[in-house]
Amino acid sequence: MRHILSALVRATTLATTFLFSFSIFPASAQDVNKGQQIFKKCRVCHMVGDNAKNRVGPILNGIIGRKAATVEKFKYSPAMKAASNAGLVWTEAALDQYLSNPRKMVPQTRMTFAGIPQPIDRKNLIAYLKTAAPTK
């Protein structure tokens, strides 16, 4: 009997591991629509889209892959310029880290936003920002 119970526990454990390891439940899938909703927090200072203009913060069109502090006609903080000079590029990973706590990643940045604590919210926001093509 003990042998049967042990085999049943192993089979259940294997089945559970299989289901989660092959992402049958896509809990971490990026959702552009949710990202657009999260962007509402950013709209106070930033814009995206065809008619985007710099506000308190720079436009975010084409941010993925762009070197930090390079939007024309935007006055960046000395801290953000220093981060750019040190080689900061807005990769998805760098943007994720920054959005979790902007002042931790770039101390003395002018961005006063506290950050987005939930990793899935940041991933969804980044997925949305990827849809904002660079301005021409």
Image: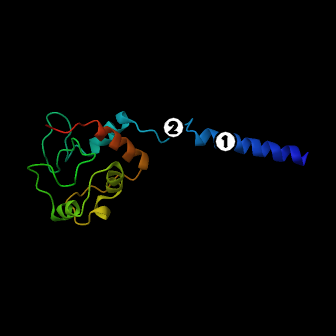
Pinpoint residue 99: horizontal percent, then vertical percent: 32, 53
Quarter of the rendering occupied by the C terminus: top left
Dot 2 or dot 1, earlier in sequence: 1
Give the amino acid at mark 2. Pro
Considering the numbered disc 1 on the image, is that residue within a helix, a strand or a loop? Answer: helix
The label shown at residue 101 is none
Q: Which residue is mark 1?
A: 16
54 left or right of 102 in image: left
The label shown at residue 26 is 2
Above or below residue 50? Residue 60 is below
Where residue 69 sits, quadrant-wise, is: bottom left
Label pair 2/1, CB-CB below 8 angstroms: no
Considering the numbered disc 2 on the image, is that residue within a helix, a strand or a loop? Answer: loop
Identity of the residue furthest to the right in this view: 1
Pinpoint residue 39: horizontal percent, then vertical percent: 29, 42
Pinpoint residue 132: horizontal percent, then vertical percent: 25, 37
108 left or right of 73 in image: right
Pinpoint residue 3: horizontal percent, then vertical percent: 88, 47
Nearest the eye: 42 or 71 = 71
Give the amino acid at mark 1. Thr
The residue under the point 82% across, 44% down is 7
The residue under the point 64% across, 40% down is 18
The residue under the point 87% across, 43% down is 4
